[in-house]
Image (cartoon, rainbow, N blue to C red):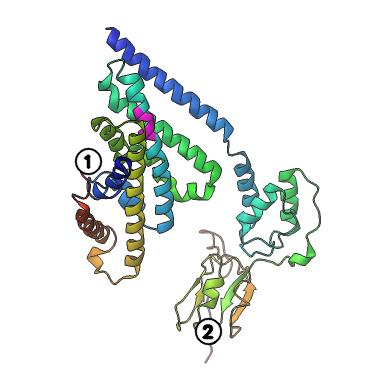
Amino acid sequence: MSGVVTALGVLLGLLLGIGLVLRISARRMAPDEDSVVEKINAVLPQTQCAQCGYPGCRPYAEAIARGEADINQCPPGGEAGVRELAELLGREPKPLDAERGETKPPQVAFIDEDRCIGCTLCIQACPVDAIVGAAKRMHTVIEADCTGCELCLPPCPVDCIDLVPRPAPFIWPEPGARTDSIPIEVRHG
Amino acid sequence: MDLLLIVVSAALVNNFVLVQFLGLCPFLGVSGRVEGAAGMAMATAFVLTLSAVASYVLTAWVLEPLGLEYLRIVAFIVVIAGLVQLTELTLRHVAPLLHRVLGIYLPLITSNCAVLGVALLNVREQHSLVESALYGFGAAAGFGLVLVLLAAARERLELADVPASFRGAPIALITAGLMALAFMGFAGFAKL
């Protein structure tokens, strides 16, 4: 009988001890700073364009959290992004740093496939792997993944990449919606 | 010399994965990419060494004086689970990106049979505290070595012209088998 009591006591003590250690270390290493980084990162537009001077959005978010970078270095986020960051961090909103670049409407890269020579340089430059293609084969852009960061423009040796405004997403017409005209095309001749 | 022998024996001669066939699930699960494999190897090394020490302390100071050896497996699993939680907390704090890469495989270290195997083998071989720690470290080094090797091989296999029916898991298993054959070459180098 006493054996059972000792066994239960030892196990209970073990569990309580480990639980206590975990609780204390969880307090100590609360992902406090991380969650701030995550929140900042969630506000940033994730274009990975590096116009802020950091290699991507997350490094920039980390720099803001450390207090190294200012909140007005993200042109794709625009004034709205700066305002959102200021609200999140409890700081005064300030105008966008004009040196970093200008805010543009959403755009996507478009490769003129007739001019592409298949050099793969833009594939290496793309921060989000939105360009597919192989050496000496035509390249093309995966529109859904392209962030319009313009980083593929400088390496292209034949200037076959253009940035076009992002087309509005196609929305299927609502079923049952009343249309007054029946779409019939009349061809003459 | 004996201590060095313990490390070499646990890492190469009696390699936990390829010779004793313990810890096969993370071996095949996390060996898709070298970076993930290296991170997993380091996390496992941390847990393995610590759990070897902790289980020795638990056995020598608590279970044996009280005559509770039959609680060994339960107590070891509890200690290992706690250590894994601690590792996860530390990793999330220090390297959040690696934490995300490892994902579900990090908590799964708990059920890595190599970790429990090291703790139980330490008791069976009646290792001292230092020997236990070195045995755990050697086992972790061997596990990490074969994990990174297999990950490197599998990264190359992705680009190889593998017959369709062998792609993915089958070719990985065949590769692991060939690696195990190579590790048989170490057999008999160190008796332990």
Magenta run includes residue B53? yes
Percent coordinates x, y for residue B131 in the rendering: 33, 35
The residue that label 1 is drawn on is B192
Q: Is residue B159 above or below residue B15?
A: below
Magenta run includes residue A94? no
Of residue A56 and residue B51, the one placed in the foreground of this image is B51
The residue that label 2 is drawn on is A116
Label 2 vs label 1, nearer the camera:
1
Residue at horizontal 58 percent and vertical 35 percent from the top: A30
Q: Is residue B56 above or below residue B179?
A: above
Residue at horizontal 62 percent and vertical 57 percent from the top: A57
- Give the left or right position of residue A102, taking residue B16 as reference: right
- Give the left or right position of residue A11, taking residue A30 as reference: left
Magenta range is B51-56
Residue type at numbered disc 2: Cys
Q: Is residue A160 above or below residue A54?
A: below
Percent coordinates x, y for residue A52 in the rendering: 69, 61
Label the magenta part by its dominant secondary structure.
Answer: helix
